[in-house]
Image: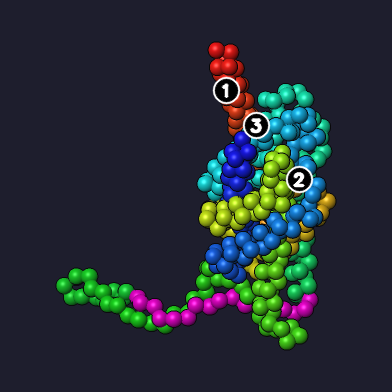
Amino acid sequence: MTILLLIAVGFLAFSNGSNDNFKGVATLFGSGTATYRTAITWATITTFAGSICSLYIAQSLLRKFSGKGLVPDALVGSEYFLLAIALGAGITVILATRLGFPISTTHCLTGAIVGSGLVGVGGQVAFGVLGSQFVLPLILGPVLAAFLGAVLYIAFRFLRLRLGITKESCLCVGSEQRVVPLAHPASVLAVQHAVSLAVTLDSKAQCLDRYAGAYFGVNCQRTMDCAHFLNSGIVSFARGLNDTPKLAALLLVVQTIEIHWGLALVGVAMALGGVLNARRVAETVSHKITAMNHGQGFSANLATGILVILASTEGLPVSTTHVSVGALFGIGVTTRQANFRVLSGILLSWLLTVPCAAILSGAAYWLLTHAAGVKALTASLSITQ
């Protein structure tokens, strides 16, 4: 059971990395500041750093996501209960990742705890604790992020205009081959290829705004890029800080493994998941929620980083996914470029996350306990004979 639990938690952490790792750097990729490979490398390094630091400054989340307080202590100490949680949440996250939906691992864990708890102890699940300590922070997270992202963008834009920092757009200049129709006496169509100079303003999707000039002798665009990278690193660090204890909490029951090693296992598995399996979710978060330029991406990232770090230090189980998507949506509403069709699909996936994880986890707990009961009965009969 210990080995199975380690494998299941590793699988959950891999799934989490696949779905969540890129969200901290999505604005780097979406705004054209960095390529996909550069962005995922930066996300992997900073997320792993957050995973290591979570051992020292996010201890309260370790206790919350072991199920303590939600279900009786006897069930919290059951390896079958924790194994069922890891399986239910991990399968839900990996399915969403394959479909390209950015969902919340926190939601999955919460649903899995409730599902296994209902199968294990029925009405003894403390739904009052669930509402105040889990559901409320998860609902408030995206709302606050949308508001804060919009406010930061408006404030930074106002400051940029007051400082006289302008933007410049790309102008495509080059040769263009054209087909020119020619008249022919025999009424036969004739064409001629001609090469001419063409000047074109590119489409909004391809033309990237850049900040022109320098301020106090410092190039404005380079300053923005550096700040954007730093801020994205902070968001990824905060995600590792907030998510790692939630997953490592499932290993608290394993007496033979120190929690330090459990956190290391989760951190490594999360990093691998992001490197190997993050592309589909990356496209959704970076390009499909809203178009963004450098300043808009920076504002969304800053809002996400502030909220997730505050939540981690206070022990509040907010979802980095909800906060990140909420901040991007706030920017999109402000600039009138939000894709409501994509957002409605994401919201639907969020609504389905909890019941899906609960059903899978509850089914896993039932199968595990019944299999253990059959095995114990068989052993007892063998001894009797």
Question: Residue type at mark 1?
Answer: Lys
Q: Position of residue 254 (x, y in %)?
A: 69, 40
Q: Which circle's residue, 2 or 3, is located before the other in the chain?
A: 2
Name the residue furthest bottom. Answer: 217
Give the crowd class for mark 2: few <14, some 14-19, many >=20 residues within 10 Å: many
Q: Position of residue 298 (x, y in %)?
A: 69, 66
**Residue located at (75% from left, 79% from top):** 164
Q: Nearer the viewer, residue 316 or 214?
A: 316
Give the crowd class for mark 3: few <14, some 14-19, many >=20 residues within 10 Å: many
Q: Is residue 169 magenta?
A: yes
Please, what secondary structure does the residue beneath circle 3 have? helix
Find disc 2 in the rendering and name its residue.
62
**Residue located at (55% from left, 71% from top):** 207
Q: Is residue 246 above or below residue 50?
A: above
Find disc 1 in the rendering and name its residue.
375
| Whole-number angstrom distance, CA of label 2 to CA of label 3 | 18 Å
Q: Which residues are magenta?
A: 162-178
| Whole-number angstrom distance, CA of label 1 to CA of label 2 | 32 Å
Give the label, 2 or 3, closer to the camera: 3
Q: Is residue 383 magenta?
A: no
Q: Nearer the viewer, residue 204 or 364?
A: 364
